[in-house]
Image (cartoon, rainbow, N blue to C red):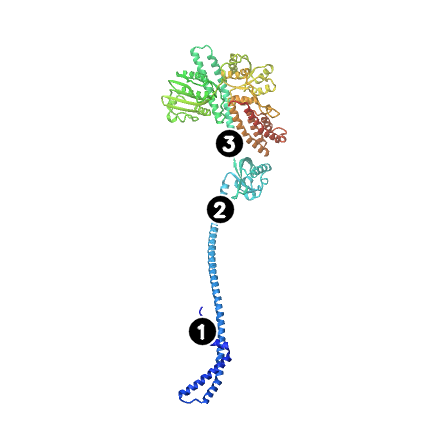
Amino acid sequence: MQESPSTNTWAFRFAQFVEKHGTVKLSLIFVFITLGFTIAGSYIIRVSLGSTSTLEDYISAVILVMLSAPWLLYFFSELVKQLEMSRSHLQEVIEELESLREEDVLLNKELQNNIKQLNFEIEKRRNAQLEREKVFEELEKEIRDKSEQEIQARRLSMLLRSIIDASPDLIYYRNEEGKFAGCNRVAEQLTGRTQDELLGLTPHEVYDEDLAREVAASDHEVLENNISITEELWLRFPDGKRRYFEMRKVPFFDHDGNRLGLLAFGRDMTERMKAEKAAEQASKDKTKFIATISHELRTPLNGIVGLSRMLRDTKLNDEQFSWVSTIYASAITLGNIFNDIIDLDKLGRDKIELSYKTLSLASFTEELGSVIKLLAADKNLGFRATVHEPLPSYVQVDGTRLRQILWNILFNAVKFTVKGHVSLTVSAKTTDNKIANVRFTVEDTGVGIPQEDVDKIFAMYYQVDHPDHQSATGTGIGLAICKEMVERMNGSIKVVSEMGKGTRFHIDIPLEISQKQRVREELEVTGLHILLVEDIELNVMIAKALLEKLGQTVDVAMTGQEAIDKVRSTRYDLILLDIQLPDMTGFDVADTIIQEDLVMQTPIVALTANVIKKRDEYLQRGMDDVIAKPVKKSRVIQVFNELFANELEELPPIDIEEPKDDKGLDKIMDVELIQTLVDTIGAEMVTTSLGVFEDKIPEYLEILVSNLTAKEKDEVCSQAHKIKGAASSMGLIRIQRIANEIQQGDHPAWWENVNEWVDELSAAIENDVNVLKDWIASQKFEI
């Protein structure tokens, strides 16, 4: 580093010299130098001037120097000293300035850093300000949006409220505490209070006590189990009118899944219930009318069929035989029309059931063909029935329904054929040793069916509107019933027709092949002492003649009381009992003689023209079997053989596991009835029926319990009646007995015992159904 120029000057070095040696010494040196300079100068001047130097010149010079030099030297020394001091001070100032400069540099750097930091903070604050402004803008926008949403929400709320108020249904909602939180106008009308008045009230503060308990119970169930329930209630309006509501209650939650309470929706079902009751009553009236008219018409028809059949077995000439055969065929035709009408009623009530039994197709075809041949002969038509082998000897089928199907189609074929022939062909294809696909083909050379009507002829009440069909008309229900029956047998029916050439029907039905013959052609028991209870003389004459021709002995009773008196005095092998008697019903007669233990070993067979009722209904009322009117010889032989001839057969022993219940099976179920059901409709149908029983009974029991909670005795008795009827159909006698006790609402201690009965019924249902299922499984019935 180079030295500063100020430190290299002579003045600086002189000042340093003065400071180093001091003013006195410097003054002495300066005096001596000045004296020498002065003397030398004087001398030089004198010499230069050419004069001689004198002592006075030197003394004057010395004096002058001595007088002036010290002061001058002092002045200059002080000046130098002051200058040095100034310089030193200046140096210090410079150093201080330098220090200040350095500090200033540092401060400047720090200031620059601070400025940068400040600029950063300013930028950051500016950005923050921009962010705040952006947030404020977004907030303002959100506020505007929320305001719009709130306006929209208020509009939607008003719209929703308007919709809810406009709804004819009852709507309300309650919070977790069971207090009203809102409702619609129908609820206000029902309670006689506004929504604001209802807010915060409980059901007990709004409804009467019985209804409040029922409503609170169902509300508790909804909130306790987080489930939706449906119930039916009678609700009373302030004007005293009662309306029947179907209530649907559901829990409702917020977006986070927190339950807020329950919503209830109620639909006024009063009018629908009235309509259903009216329709049910109309259906009952129609069924009763059909049953009555059927009985009234079948009674004379029974005489016509029976007498004409008996006349055909006598010696007649050809013309007489033809007349009698026409009467016989016409009566059978009329009977089949009755069957169609009755089945139409059953279809409307979904009461059609199939009863599969062993049947010989060859014999069946021959029997059916013999009657159709008579109808065809009346119109001079040819008829042939053909059976193509191989054909299963016996199949399981509902012979009555199959006969009805083929009869309708064959009868139509004869009716709409003017000339030519009608034919019935039966063939089968066996897929395995169990199932045969049987085809029945009915062909005629009649007027035919227009192509556009082919797909419509199976519609109910449909009749072909064509000039060629005007000569023969019908009810329009026969083919519709045929199609329904075929489909219930898992079969199909097809038709091919050409106008003017004829029609061909194909009926394909899969039938189970039977390995054993159950229907016997010949009567295997004779000499029976039979009591015939019948009030119509014509029927008595026909039935008595038929029975005596079959080798039986017959006593006749025309009234119920006469029958009871005869049974009290005489032991009979069989009682044939008409259901409609002048003084009492056949069921009353059966109840009396059974209660008096007069028929411990005597079967009772019902004679009835009321085919509306099911066979099971007669069996449940104490009958051992049923014979429909008009009485057929084949049916009499079948029933007699089943009741008496089978007693002689050796039956293989069946190991039945004893029930664990100490009371035994006979206290739980009617084994005899169930066995009869299995023999009549098959084990598969019994098992299916038991499955339906299991599905329906809990529902009936639940309704019974809820009505018991609401103290609705009539409804409790009604549900008990349903359970009793269902149990009796399945032979569950203990359930039937308990339900019957609950059903007797006029019992003097009904309210004291009903809860115990209901508990007993619930336990019996849970146990007895399983016992019946196990028993059926242990029997290993053929399905």
Three-letter amino acid code of the residue under disc 3: Ala
Q: Which residue is mark 3?
A: 275
Upstream in the sequence, badge 2 or badge 1?
A: 1
Upstream in the sequence, badge 3 or badge 2?
A: 2
The answer to whether the residue labelled 1 contacts the one labelled 3, judged by CB atoms less than 8 Å apart, is: no
Q: Which residue is mark 2?
A: 153
Q: Which residue is mark 1?
A: 8
**In 3D space, how far apart are the residues under numbered discs 3 and 2 (Cα atoms)?**
42 Å
Please tell me whether mark 3 sits on a helix, a strand or a loop: helix
Residue extending farthest left: 500
Three-letter amino acid code of the residue under disc 1: Asn
Quadrant of the frame with the N terminus: bottom left
Three-letter amino acid code of the residue under disc 2: Ala
Between circles 1 and 3, the one closer to the viewer is 1
Rendering coords of residue 396 (x, y %): 48, 21
Please tell me whether mark 1 sits on a helix, a strand or a loop: loop
Mark 2 neighbour density, 10 Å: few (under 14) some (14–19) many (20 or more) = some
Rendering coords of residue 421 (x, y %): 38, 18
Q: Is residue 499 above or below residue 115?
A: above
Between circles 2 and 1, the one closer to the viewer is 1
Q: Is residue 660 left or right of residue 523?
A: right
Report whether residue 83 is seen: no
Mark 3 neighbour density, 10 Å: few (under 14) some (14–19) many (20 or more) = few
Report whether residue 99 is seen: yes
Mark 1 neighbour density, 10 Å: few (under 14) some (14–19) many (20 or more) = few
Of residues 551 and 112, the one nearer the viewer is 112
Residue at image location 48% in from the left, 27% down from the top: 348
Label number found at residue 169: none
Rendering coords of residue 222 (x, y %): 55, 38
